[in-house]
Image (spheres, helix red, strand yellow):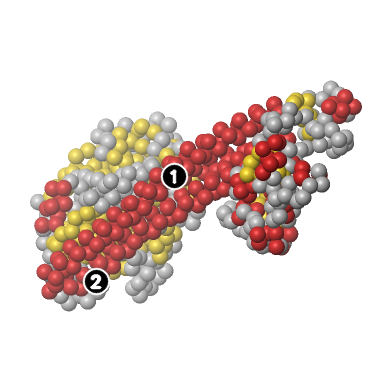
Amino acid sequence: MEHQQLFPPPAFLQCLLCSKLYESPKILPCLHSFCNQCIEKEFCNKNIITCPQCHERFDISQKELPRNIYLENRVDLYLEQSKHFTDPSCIFCKLSAQEKKEAVSQCVTCLDLLCKECSERHTSTTSTIDHQVIPITEIKSGKYDDTILLVKYKTYCQKHTDEEVWNFCKTCNSLICSVCIIKDHKGHDVDRAADLIKEKENETRILCQGLKDKTSELKQCRVSFTSRRNELKKWEEKKIAEIKKMCSEAVSKIDRGKNQILNDLDNYLKQKSRDLGKGISNITAQCSNISDSVQYVEHVLNGMGAQKIFLFGELQGRLANLDKKIKESIPFTDFSQETENIRIMVTEPKLEITLDKPEDIHEKTYENSAKDCSISTAAVDDDNDNSSDIFYVCDKAVQTSEADFESFTEINSDQKRNYSLELIISHDLRTPSDKHPSYFTSVAWINENQFVAVDAGNAKVKICSFPLGTILNSTQVTKPLAVSAWKDGIFCLTQENKMIIFSSELCPRNTLQNISSLCPSLPSSISYQWIENKTIVTQKKLNVSKLPIVCFPPNRFPVFFRYACSLPNGFYALSDMSNNCVYLVDGNGSIFKALPCNPGSISFDKFYNVFIADFHNSSMRVFDLKGNHLADLLLKHRPRSISILHDKLIVAAEFGSQVFVYDIFYR
């Protein structure tokens, strides 16, 4: 211990768990090492372990953890050096019985300690002219440890202990000497160990260099994330100042909304800041893992003899795994438009923040990031309404033009809009392959040139062109009931409460069970939604979120949602068939309005007004987002299903093989 205090060991020779020099170190697949005793104590013979340093999980049930021969040799070398360098003396002066002289250098070729005079003479003889004599101060720095290891720890044959191994038998997977080739390995596939090592070293160095190059990419991403987080903070301060100013000017009308919108903005930006922070932490951890692994690999490559041939599999496997993780996780995200289109408007008596083109910070990592959206904080304008402000996040409707938006915001919410319908075309969707009479239970727009329909009579989902009505594609589905479209495909509900997700070409991708209802939105939406019992479920890429529905009014019967619709402002409309009503639900899952109408299929127009099909009265009822009744529209047939895109309404009627398309007129 006294030696170690005078000559402290380098940090990488100390076990992270016990903080002592390694004893019988074992190496994990992540290339981090720990004392054998520490591993046994920490993991207690578990098959699945978590590295205490990088927190990666590994299954070690199939093989025993390998010895870390490199660290064993380094610890032995350190212990030997700590004794010699405490009071170093010249070996030649000692052998010639001269007085004890302090060694000032060491030959890293023959490992002799030398005084000043012997150091000068050492490279003057024929046998030692090529030797390399280094000052002890440099030796203590550890700069030449790998060179000393190569000299000190040569690999000798296990059978012929005085013979150094020069060959590797691929047949037996063992290092062998020249005698072994003749006696025990005749006819085996034998290569020179040096050639094989050189080949493996080149492969490993290429992997190391690749990881080093990609580390610079990760660091650049970290700089971008840090810079963006700082920008978000500045944006937050700027927007908070603007919000406070506007609220002060209109305090009599929007005072109730001030604190709420500040909190909403704070939450929105904090979420993005947290997302960026996660990205920074993830990149920092990856850089640390790569640095540790590459440093260790380079030590092994430079400071270990022929036995390193047994480590190449572990080394290359770890490096390849790190390379794969970088490819999967490096974000290539453009942050340029994330906040540049933020606008703050007072449309009395509510205060709004609108983001025209927000971007996701990191789509694979951040499960809680907000949807691509508009953020709106609306103070209720009824003087007698004491309810709190409503915060909602919504997709901006692709089908709505800026002119529509302006006219929508200019019209007083109490003013009823005059609607009218005109039937423009009907399509007979029967095909020669249909074996039974067709009847359609659901219809939905895919885009302005295509729609999809459920032919329950023939158990088919059909994609059709518009305005020609040509069947473009179809597929068989057992007991199909309802259908809708989203950006990347079609989803279909069956009578067995299964939801089948199809690609745009009607190739099945996934099936979910126990689904109560589809919850369609815009066909351009990047997410799709459905109802499970009393919960609204949203799937966006790989992320799934659930919103429980609460605040039900007193009902005579258990609720049964047969139809639903996700509105562009983040609200929902749900048809409760059991209790014969339609609910409006806010972005928090709270029911805030029960509409006075028969429950039926639901859609919305370009002004975000809600259309509800009334099957029994062959009509549709129209409401605004607050639940105010706007109009009743008569249809020529009883509507089973409706869908609206732009100014076009498509209807699947009660009987027959036809669907009907109407023009919607606004006056």
- Image location of residue 644, percent across then percent down: 25, 47
614 or 629: nearer the eye?
629
* Residue labelled with disc 1: 218
Q: Residue furthest front?
A: 98
- Does residue 54 appear in this view? yes
* Residue labelled with disc 2: 259
- Image location of residue 155, percent across then percent down: 78, 37
Q: Residues within 10 Å of mark 2 (few under 14, many from 20)?
A: some
Give the residue drawn at x 14%, y 70%.
Answer: 248
Give the residue drawn at x 22%, y 76%.
Answer: 386
Q: Residue furthest right?
A: 183
Tell me the CA gap for discs 1 and 2: 39 Å
- Does residue 520 appear in this view? no
Give the residue drawn at x 79%, y 47%.
Answer: 98
Left/right of residue 19 with respect to residue 396 in the rendered view = right
137 or 176: nearer the eye?
137
- Secondary structure of the residue carrying tag 1 is helix
Left/right of residue 421 with respect to residue 642 in the rendered view = left
Up the image or down, 354 lies above or below 391; here it is: above
Q: From the viewer's perspective, is the residue at label 1 or at label 2 nearer?
A: 1
Residue type indicated by callout 1: Leu
Residue type indicated by callout 2: Asn
